[in-house]
């Protein structure tokens, strides 16, 4: 087995950056081609333990373009083939599952998710396009490690969250820890490496902080800098917390909650309103001064 490698395929939140219908201040910079900002696709990460088998952490709506932009994921060998051996889902939001529809060309891989997330796929007939003879849906229990092709081990763990946006009926319970929103811990053992991916978290619990503290690399929910950022930007009526995303700043934000975590800490799933997307902005400087990195598409990590 080799080292644990990861490639950030996409680093933006749902909608991507810029978002197709958005002229908020930060999107407008991207539309104008301003060099201080880089466009980003919707969040997905590929990990590998041997450089030959790759595991996708979520399947974003931008997956096809992400594969084309990533040589490690190009087909090799047989006429029909793919290095993508497994897909792990951390929830059933559209930006986590829609890319499955781009993997429909009769290719075998294993799909791992909680029973709650798998039931979203089971309930939606469009996902039957992934032939069950080829794509095995594996029900993963919380906190039970499972093996992946290429020698990695993964564990899904609960994260405070909520049901996917498209399943909300009235006011959803926010911050529930169950199977709807999970994080994933990826481990290799020789040499040892541990990466934790949490693209959505409504809060940081003591358990979550402990889990992040023992990782080498943390990819964490950087959706909004300020809880009321989308309201202030005129792009929506909801706070970050209402969307199941803890803000970065403030005494109850992720920067404060994770300040003592010694892992390499990287914000991912960054919403297009978030000023950390602008190189040299005060918010970008603030997160960097606190030891955080800001994920970009194509970022490669070797643990
Ligand atoms: C989220 O992370 O809150 C969702 O991806 C929202 C969405 O689907 O737009
Ligand atoms: Mn999302
Ligand atoms: Zn925008």
Image: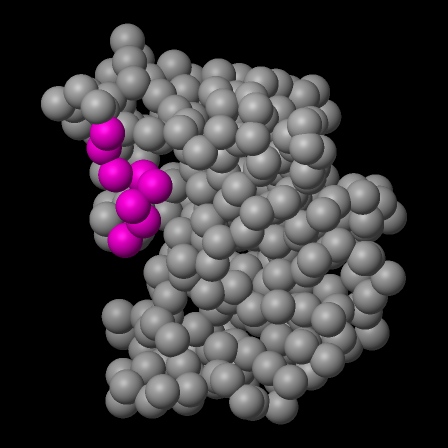
Q: Say whether residue 130 is left or right of residue 72.
A: left
- Which residue does the image show at 23% across and 29% down from the upper left? 76
Question: Could you say where residue 258 lies in the image, as x and y percent from the top left?
Answer: 79, 61
Position of the C terminus, as image quadrant, is top right
Q: Is residue 232 above or below residue 206?
A: below
- Which residue does the image show at 58% across and 18% down from the upper left? 147
Question: Could you say where residue 20 lies in the image, as x and y percent from the top left?
Answer: 26, 70
Q: Is residue 174 above or below residue 245?
A: above
Secondary structure predominantly adopted by residues drawn in magenta = loop
User: What residue range appears in magenta?
Assistant: 69-76
Nearest to the observer: residue 26 or residue 145 = 145
Visible residue check, residue 289: yes
Q: Is residue 147 magenta?
A: no
Taking the view exactly as shown, the residue that stands out farthest to the top is 133
Nearest to the observer: residue 169 or residue 188 = 188
Q: Is residue 68 above or below residue 236?
A: above
- Residue 163 quadrant: top right
Visible residue check, residue 114: no
- Which residue does the image show at 84% across and 45% down from the upper left? 210
- Residue 28 quadrant: bottom left
- Which residue does the image show at 35% across and 72% down from the upper left? 39
Q: Say whether residue 99 is left or right of residue 280.
A: left
């Amino acid at each position: 087995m080799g080292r644990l490698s990861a490639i950030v395929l996409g680093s933006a939140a749902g909608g991507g950056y810029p978002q197709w219908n958005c002229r908020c201040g930060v999107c407008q910079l991207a539309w104008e081609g301003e060099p201080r900002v880089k466009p980003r696709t919707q969040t997905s990460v590929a990990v590998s333990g041997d450089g030959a088998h790759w595991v996708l952490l979520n399947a974003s709506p931008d997956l096809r373009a992400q594969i084309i932009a990533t040589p490690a994921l190009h087909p090799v060998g047989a006429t029909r083939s793919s290095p993508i051996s497994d897909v792990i889902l951390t929830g059933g939001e559209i930006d986590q599952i829609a890319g499955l529809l781009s993997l429909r060309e009769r290719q075998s891989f294993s799909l791992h998710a909680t029973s709650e997330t798998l039931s979203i796929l089971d309930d939606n007939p469009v996902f039957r396009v992934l032939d069950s003879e080829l794509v095995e849906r594996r029900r993963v229990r919380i906190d039970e490690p499972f093996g992946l092709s290429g020698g990695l081990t993964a564990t899904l763990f609960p994260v405070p969250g909520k049901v996917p946006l498209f399943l909300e009926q009235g006011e959803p319970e926010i911050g529930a820890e169950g199977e709807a929103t999970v994080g994933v811990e990826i481990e290799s053992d020789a040499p040892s490496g541990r990466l934790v991916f949490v693209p959505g978290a409504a809060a940081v619990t003591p358990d979550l902080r402990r889990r992040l503290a023992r990782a080498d690399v943390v990819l964490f929910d950087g959706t909004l800098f300020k809880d009321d950022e989308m309201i202030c930007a005129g792009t929506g009526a909801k706070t970050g917390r209402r969307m199941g995303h803890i803000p970065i700043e403030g005494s109850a934000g992720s920067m404060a909650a994770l300040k003592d975590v010694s892992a390499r800490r990287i914000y991912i799933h960054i919403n297009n309103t978030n000023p950390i997307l602008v190189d040299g902005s005060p918010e970008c400087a603030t997160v960097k001064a606190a030891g955080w990195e800001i994920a970009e598409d194509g970022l490669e990590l070797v643990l």
